[in-house]
Amino acid sequence: MLIKLLSLMLSIRMEQQYSAVNEFIIKKAPFLRKLSSKQYMMFSFILDILLAFVIVSVLYKWLYSQQYRQQWESGFIVFFLLYSIFKGAGAYRRTHIPPFMDLIQAAPVSFKSIHITFIALELVWSIFTNSSLFFVYILFQSRIAESLDALFWMKQLNILLLGALLFMTSNKLAGAYIHNIVVKKIGWVRFVFFAAVSTAFFMLGRVLVSGLLVPIFKTFKDNFPSFLAAAEDAAWVNLSQQLINLYGNKINSFQKSLFSDGSLYLQIEHFIGTPWMLGPLIFLLVGVLSLPVKMIPTEDHGEIKRFRDFFHFYLQLLHWVRSIFLPKNALIYKDLQIIREKRWLLSKEFFNYMVLSYEAFFYIGFFTACMSATGNTALQIQLLFTLNLMVLANQAMEMRMLTPSFFSFSTEKRNIWMYQLSFFSLTEFFWAKLKLFYCLYLIPSFFLTIGNIMILTYFQIADLRMIIPFIGITISFFVFPFIQLYLFPFITKFHFIHEYEIGTTEEEESIVNNGQAFMRNFLVMPFIYYLLASLFIGVLREAAGAVNYISVLYFMIVSAICLIVCKNTMKKGIDHVEKVKILSITE
């Protein structure tokens, strides 16, 4: 029975993975109608194998050195094991929030057995969808191996089993952690932890500049005082020698301690590869699978506890924002009421969602350190302007990726048919989702604005140009949420097993990520290119005052163009939903 369940779930996952791509291809080429999602996935699987051969050939021919064989072998092993940990932890929703709870509770087998089946499903799915990684690992290890004897294959088998063990262990730990934070208050302990980690990322950004980039920049500047110096071989020789003196000796000493004969790391690697480790690894796998599991409570199953905690006051704040700016929008009120039941979805990254992400604090530390390294006020303004764009662009993407179901048409499966019968366009649904994004996005934008005031005060910047960063925040507030959602109508799917699947298939993530990245290339990257070029070209640093105003003008024009393109694309997507997708609700 469990094998049949595993086969059924794999079949459904394959069918859902590329369904929107299938519809688009069939629309353009009807003769491909007979091809199924499974066949497209098999085609992708074959391409992954071919890609693995190409990658291994390139690595071996152009980068690999026999002198560093041990380092290459160990690097691949460590990467594979770390990847297994992250993939296992990231799959906790599918193993700890199972679908079909009514059927599961009535099933003749235990919930633990079904849970093990779901873990096996995720492991098989991870191997299948990341086949190029596994083939690259096996092919490269066999290519650089001294001999392909039984000991070599036993070592690889042990490492694969260790990867599976780490996958399952991290999945169990992640599920237990999320269950723990969902059923408990989001209180001051969680806030202090968030503040501590945010401070660590902030300091990491500052240390990266002061300890790594500033010494490199000074060394480069000393050796190349002008463009003419770049044509002198002696300058490049001096530069390489100074960089080796700065960092090369430390890297070499670390490498020797790690890979010297008899080192602890090599002993552990040899220990894992011994044949008699096979039994203990299998025993540990069975032991981890046998551990008790607690299901994460959601609105569909399990009692949702309500506390007067940060989540409670966050919802009150959102309702207050709605009452001020969108008092008559019933759709947003409905969505905010639904968010109240989504505690399980927001608990894990609550403060990153409400305040700013850890990545944002890293950017703040990095850019404020750069501002401290220059006394040019205009360049400091430009750095702060670019910081705002990077933080808000990343925050919008993080919010969309954490809660795609908040903004997708797919979650309106029960309402969208009735809404269309009322002769209203689904465009209103999209605008409601976008306005909901603005409500959620307003709070991080407010915190960033406060941060800008503190930064300007710290650097004692008090002239007309100080409004430029705030102009960037204002325009970004309206642009970045739109570029995250404008492709959502195209990836609408009304056939899904559970809400956590919405926006998480490879197809959906690829379409939306590439679409928003295309827009961000024009909205953010030019300012980063300018800052990088100004490191080495003094004229650009001296022209920073003029660049401040040019940047604002450019950002306004490109933002307007992006909004127009996004709006037109969104309308085409909604037409597609109304003409094609909505019919599938009743199928």
Image: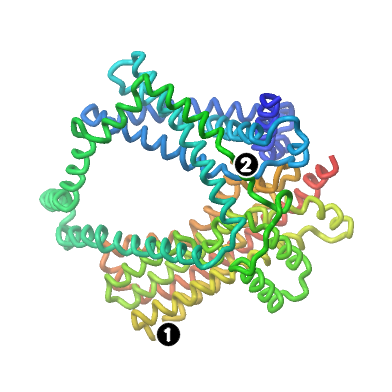
Report the residue at 15% width, 47% height from top.
Answer: 249
Q: Determine which of the numbered discs, if any, sits on residue 316 in the image.
A: none
Residue 231 is at least partly visible in this image: no
Q: Amino acid at mark 1?
A: Leu
Q: Position of residue 287 (x, y in %)?
A: 51, 31
Q: Amino acid at mark 2?
A: Arg
Q: Quadrant of the C terminus?
A: top right
Query: What residue does disc 2 label?
Result: 94
Other residues around mark 1 within 10 Å, as few (<14) / some (14–19) / many (≥20)? few
- Mark 2 is surrounded, within 10 Å at the Cα level, by few (under 14), some (14 to 19) or many (20 or more) other residues, namely some
**Disc 1 designates what residue?**
464
Q: Residue at x 65, y 30 (%)?
A: 10
Q: Residue furthest top?
A: 149
Q: Is residue 342 above or below residue 175?
A: below
- Give how far across and how far down residue 373 sits, in percent: 27, 70
Residue 488 vs residue 266, the one in the foreground: 266
Residue pictured at 45% horizontal, 27% vertical: 161
Separation of disc 2 and disc 1 at Cα?
A: 53 Å
| Closer to the camera in the image, 476 or 91 | 91
Q: Are marks 2 and 1 in contact (CB under 8 Å)?
A: no
The image quadrant where one finds the N terminus is top right
Residue that extends furthest to the bottom in the rendered view of this protein: 463
The answer to whether residue 63 is above or below residue 535 is: above
Q: Secondary structure at mark 1?
A: helix
Residue 533 lies, in percent from the top left, at 32, 61
Q: Colour scheme of this structure image? A: rainbow
> Residue 397 sits in which quadrant?
bottom right
Q: Quadrant of residue 156?
A: top left
Whichever of callouts 2 and 1 sits on the residue coming sooner in the sequence is 2
Local SS, label 2 = helix
